[in-house]
Image (cartoon, grey):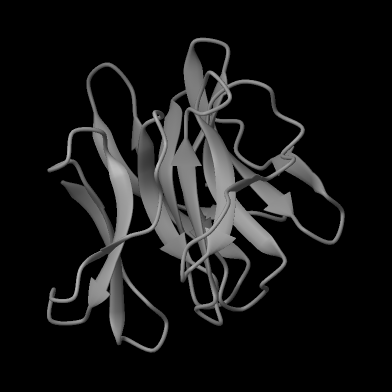
Amino acid sequence: NSGARFSPDGSKVAMVLSGEGNPEIYVSNAQGRQVARRTRSASVEASPCWSPDGSQLLFTSDAAGGPQLYLMSSSGGGMQRIPTNISGYCAEPDWSTVNPNKIAFTTGIGRGYQIAVYDFSKRASVQVSHAPFDGIEPCWLGDGRHLVYTARDRNTTRICILDTESGKS
């Protein structure tokens, strides 16, 4: 069980539970009661995240053969793949509350990981980190421009701030 996130209004929690076998997305009330399953697939789902208005859930699924980003109504229904224009690994999304057109996520680049931003208005992604270490687990800051993320190499793990416009950490 993992990946719990409160809805923007604080009334619900999205999470990944595997009690019925396969990791699936569930939603409960803020007290953890009235748990309802939202996804039903043979794939593994992970990292749920709410849209800024709380109407949609964004998450990772390996339904396409590898981790990709998917969207669905927060009340349930079909999953729709986000056309990130990245064929490899896409996971750990975070939806900007300041700019609802932007989603930050971890992407696989070569043998490592970097941070990318998907823009709904352009229907495309841009790699925003170019560090000599892995960049994972991005989370938007309140200004809609910067991300806090985990930076790691073989010997060190640290928290960094990334300017998504300049690419500087």
Q: x, y (%) of residue 148? A: 42, 56
Residues 36 and 152: in front is 36
Q: Position of residue 130 (x, y in %)?
A: 61, 31
Q: Is residue 54 left or right of residue 156?
A: right
- Say which residue appears at 54% left-offset and 25% top-offset: 89
Does the image show residue 92?
no
Can you see residue 116? yes
Query: Which residue occupies the extreme top position in the image?
Result: 111
Instruction: Estimate the x, y position of residue 69 in percent, counting from the top left.
Output: 57, 42
Position of 83 relative to 50 (above/below): above
The residue at 43%/61% (across/down) is: 49
Between 26 and 124, the residue placed more toward the observer is 26
- Rendered view: 150 above or below 30: above
- Count of picture labels: 0
Q: Is 43 in front, or is 69? A: 43
Q: Position of residue 98 (x, y in %)?
A: 61, 78
Asked if residue 17 lies left or right of residue 140, the reply is: left
Where residue 107 sits, quadrant-wise, is top right
Residue for point 70% across, 28% down: 86
* Residue at x 68% of width, y 22% of height: 87
Q: Residue furthest right?
A: 122
